[in-house]
Image (cartoon, rainbow, N blue to C red):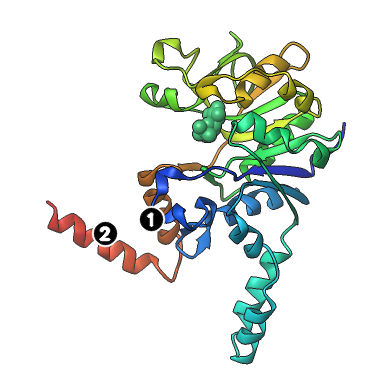
Amino acid sequence: MKKVTKAVIPAAGLGTRFLPATKALPKEMLPIIDTPNIHYIVKEAVEAGITDILIIVSHAKEPIEDYFDVNYELETRLKETGKLKQAEEIREIANMANIFYVRQKEPKGLGDAIGYARSFASGEPIAVLLGDDLIDDKERPAIGELIEAYEQTGGTILGCRRVPKELLRKYGVVKPTAKAEGKVFEVMDMVEKPKDPSLAPSDIAVLGRYVLPPEIFDVIARTPKGVGGEVQLTDAIKLSLEKRKCYACLFTGERYDIGDKFGYIKATLDFALRRDDLRENVLDYLRRINEENR
Ligand code: G1P
């Protein structure tokens, strides 16, 4: 079995939930404190052993390419003014991985976007990381857990967690086998964004991480449009169940839905509380707000 060394990050969406900022800035570049959120996604992949990353973009996403490129002028300026550590930091970003870009020509859904990775994958399995799901795992990268499950089972792997019933409508929801237990278990069926909790086959949702086998591209090509008139990755995976087993992997680590404003605030606060340069001030401020609002 081929080792998983390639990852795909879809980043073609308009980011309408973060307008007006996303009128002029890709949502992937919105910072958690001082670091664009896509940096954390790339870092997670790199820490799991990924060497090559394809970012699927659309027009007006050039700031992402600039961010992962070398910026000689800025580096030179920083060095000239003695800011050597910062110069080194911005250089390291350009060396994180081999990053490639392709444009999704029309917004036709996540399945369609992943379809653009066919020649990048070139017959190998791919890890997929969605930017709206930020997973902070101090011990090991979430996608690394999925890659391990892929290596053990050889099946399609879905990064999953249990979510409250009222939120299931936002996600792809899996139907596990009757004897589902432990961290990795087989999935028999999936439903993309069930309108009502009663239509959801379980409370186990797919949260933005996948390892997909090489044949997924042929399956995507024959997947009809689904929810929202878009080609859904969930539907393609469902079709692929005929030939390839599929497993849910309940990853550990704190997951933030940063496609949601409150989720974004939570991530920002938690990340700040973990930083020595910010923790005390942020805690003091939170205590003060708490007192004032009692
Ligand atoms: C996508 C997928 C959905 C998955 C979700 C994870 O939906 O279609 O199956 O559960 O990501 O975050 P989106 O949030 O892009 O609408």
Compared to residue 67, the image places residue 233 above or below, namely: above
Mark 2 element type: helix
Tally the numbered discs. 2
Mark 1: give few (<14), some (14-19) or many (20+) Cα within 10 Å: some
Where is residue 142? Give x, y as percent: 62, 41
Q: Earlier in the sequence, mark 1 or mark 2?
A: 1
Q: Residue at x 40, y 68 (%)?
A: 278
Disc 1 C-beta below 8 A from ligand 1: no
> Which residue, given by chain and number where applicable, does mark 1 sit on?
269
Report the residue that reaches farthest toward the top. Answer: 178
Mark 1 element type: helix
In terms of image quadrants, where is residue 221?
A: top right
What kind of residue is marked 1? Leu
What kind of residue is marked 2? Leu
In terms of image quadrants, where is residue 150?
A: top right
Q: Is residue 140 left or right of residue 294?
A: right
> Which residue, given by chain and number where applicable, does mark 2 sit on?
286
Where is residue 121? Give x, y as percent: 81, 38
Q: Which mark is residue 115?
A: none
What is the distance, in whole Å, between disc 1 and disc 2 at their CAs? 10 Å
Q: Nearer the viewer, residue 11 or 171?
A: 11
Where is residue 155? Give x, y as percent: 75, 23
Q: Residue at x 48, y 22 (%)?
A: 193
Mark 2: give few (<14), some (14-19) or many (20+) Cα within 10 Å: few
Instruction: Confirm or deny contact between disc 1 and disc 2 (CB under 8 A).
Output: yes
Where is residue 277? Give x, y as percent: 43, 71
Q: Residue at x 60, y 10 (%)?
A: 179
